[in-house]
Image (spheres, rainbow, N blue to C red):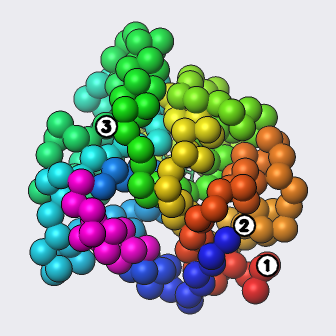
Amino acid sequence: FNIFIDKSFDSVCELAAQEILDFIKKKPNAVIGLATGNTPKGLYKSLVKKAKEQNVSFKQVTTFNLDEYVGLDEKSSDSYNVYMQKHLFQHLDFDENRIHLPSLSKDIEQNIDDYQKLLSEHKIDIQILGIGSNGHIGFNEPGTKFDSKVHLADLTESTIYDNQIYFKDTNNIPKQAITMGIDDIMKAGKILLLASGSNKRKTIKTLIDGQITESFPASILKKHPLVYIYLDHHAALDIS
Ligand code: F6R
């Protein structure tokens, strides 16, 4: 792993954002894999600011999000679709036809097939990842096969617990999501994983020091040739 640590998470987000922008400057039609949750918010903020300052266009950029909840109303403000619009898409010149997330429509099998087909027609150049406290990437929870493709995932109790703070409607927190599989993630050319805060400290230590095992999904990243890990000093405390 190439690991970047800074006292402030904003500073490591700036590094990661610049990495992405430099890539798009070289390859304006880059394919970028995106994550949601708390962690990438700072990255997207920095990306928007720097893209404007450096005049980088996202018109030809294609994006694929890692995952989307199942069972939410298509207009729900808790969806990852709305999250992405709010934190990234609406601020830059994205072409909406090149933005992809698993659909929220009712036919789950169809949504999975459609997403897998779209993914197979592209090669992700850079994949952004957060990491769940249980080591999940995307919503590939512990026990998910390393050769998994796009699938319907049952969220673990710990993930549902971790995510409840993000929901306006706490009576209606989804228990399932459609997620890219581990195999889909591993096909990306380069992976940027971000983590901040002391609640990710143990997780990061396990990622760096632990064995490769399906009970800690992120451990497979040790087999990927190009992984950059961006940490604030709280998340890095046990490894530095
Ligand atoms: C989100 C995703 C998840 C999150 C992880 C960490 O698209 O795929 O794997 O990256 O749950 O979430 P935060 O950043 O909220 O701690």
- As drawn, the residue found furthest toward the bottom would be 7
Residue 102 lies left or right of residue 204; in this view the side is: left
Q: Where does residue 38 sit, x and y in percent of width and height?
A: 47, 58
Viewer-nearest residue: 114 or 158 = 114
User: Are the residues flagged by discs 3 and 2 in contact, CB closer than 8 Å?
Assistant: no
In percent of width and height, residue 230 lies at 56, 74
Q: Residue at x 47, y 37 (%)?
A: 67
Q: Quadrant of the N terminus?
A: bottom right
Which label lies toward us, 1 or 3? 3
Q: Which residue is mark 3?
A: 100
Q: CA distance from mark 1 to mark 2?
A: 8 Å
Q: Is residue 186 left or right of residue 126?
A: right
Q: In the displayed structure, would residue 161 be above or below residue 219? A: above
Label 2 is placed on what type of residue? Answer: Ile
What number is the disc on residue 204? 2
Say which mark, if any, is on residue 238.
1
Is residue 10 among the parts visible in the rendering?
no
- Distance in Å between CA atoms under marks 3 and 2: 29 Å
Of all residues shown, which one is farthest toward the right?
211
Mark closest to the chain's N terminus, 1 or 3: 3
Q: Please report whichever mark, 1 or 2, sits nearer to the chain's N-terminal start.
A: 2
Secondary element at image label 3 = strand
Tag 1 and tag 2, C-beta contact below 8 Å: yes
Circle 2 crowding by C-alpha within 10 Å: few under 14, some 14–19, many from 20: many
Q: Element at badge 2?
A: helix
Q: Is residue 222 left or right of residue 129?
A: right
At 56% from the left edge and 23% from the top edge, which residue is drawn? Answer: 152
Near mark 3 (Cα within 10 A), the count class, few <14, some 14-19 or many ≥20, is: some
> At numbered mark 1, what does the secondary structure look like: helix, strand or loop?
loop
159 relative to 5, above or below? above
